[in-house]
Amino acid sequence: MKLNLKSTVDFGKLSANIKKYIKRFELETSALEAVKMKDRIARGRTHDGKNMEKIHKVTRLTRKLRNQNVSSPPLNATGALRRSIKARGLKIYAKEYAEYQDAGFTTNNIVRIPKKGKKSQYFDFRGKVVGRRGTTPTRKFIHTDRTFKYNRKVVKRFYSQIRESLKK
């Protein structure tokens, strides 16, 4: 009795390409997340799609003193944070204060207003606007391990590359 076996998959081809596919998947995921973070900041949304808490009275006063748009969403006064978000390799980089904004923090309500060519001006809002110290709420525009979900299109593309690579 003679037995003929025929394979319909090529694991050798897959093993030769799998590292490249994984790297591409990771790069696409980080680049897409950076774009989504910028979009969340621009629209004033948290990572779960809810609106960020509105800016406080001190922030509105500060923006007015700095000649910035008072009605724009939180984190959008100058656009510096949004513009600083960039995906480089597998990491996403942003200005240092992005982490503070995401976690929330307490201020001393002393605001520094820079003046071009002059000394900065300081305004003391302690006890005058919202109490001795101001609490900046969490903005939650950065995903955590628990809240992050992979993009379906990127995952689908990854699986289709694996399927293609398995074909003989």
Image: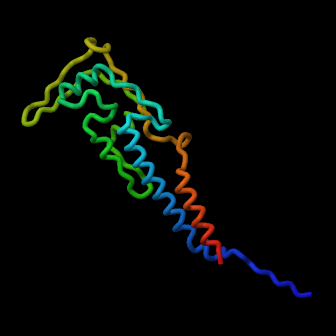
- Find the residue positioned furthest to the right: 1
Vertical placement of residue 16 versus 44, above or below? below
Residue placed most toward the observer, 13 or 100: 13
Residue at image coords 41%, 58%? 89
- Find the residue positioned furthest to the bottom: 2
| Viewport quadrant of the C terminus | bottom right
Location of residue 107 (image quadrant):
top left
Residue at image coords 42%, 35%? 45
Location of residue 59 (image quadrant):
top left
Residue at image coords 57%, 58%? 156
Residue 90 drawn at (x, y percent): 44, 56
Location of residue 56 (image quadrant):
top left
How has the structure been colored for display? rainbow
Residue 134 drawn at (x, y percent): 33, 20
Residue 42 drawn at (x, y percent): 35, 39
- Find the residue positioned furthest to the left: 117
User: Left or right of 166: which side holds 36?
Assistant: left
| Viewport quadrant of the N terminus | bottom right
Residue at image coords 45%, 53%? 30
User: Left or right of 74: which side holds 45?
Assistant: right
Residue 68 drawn at (x, y percent): 21, 31
Vertical placement of residue 65 versus 42, above or below? above
How many badges with numbers are in the image?
Answer: 0
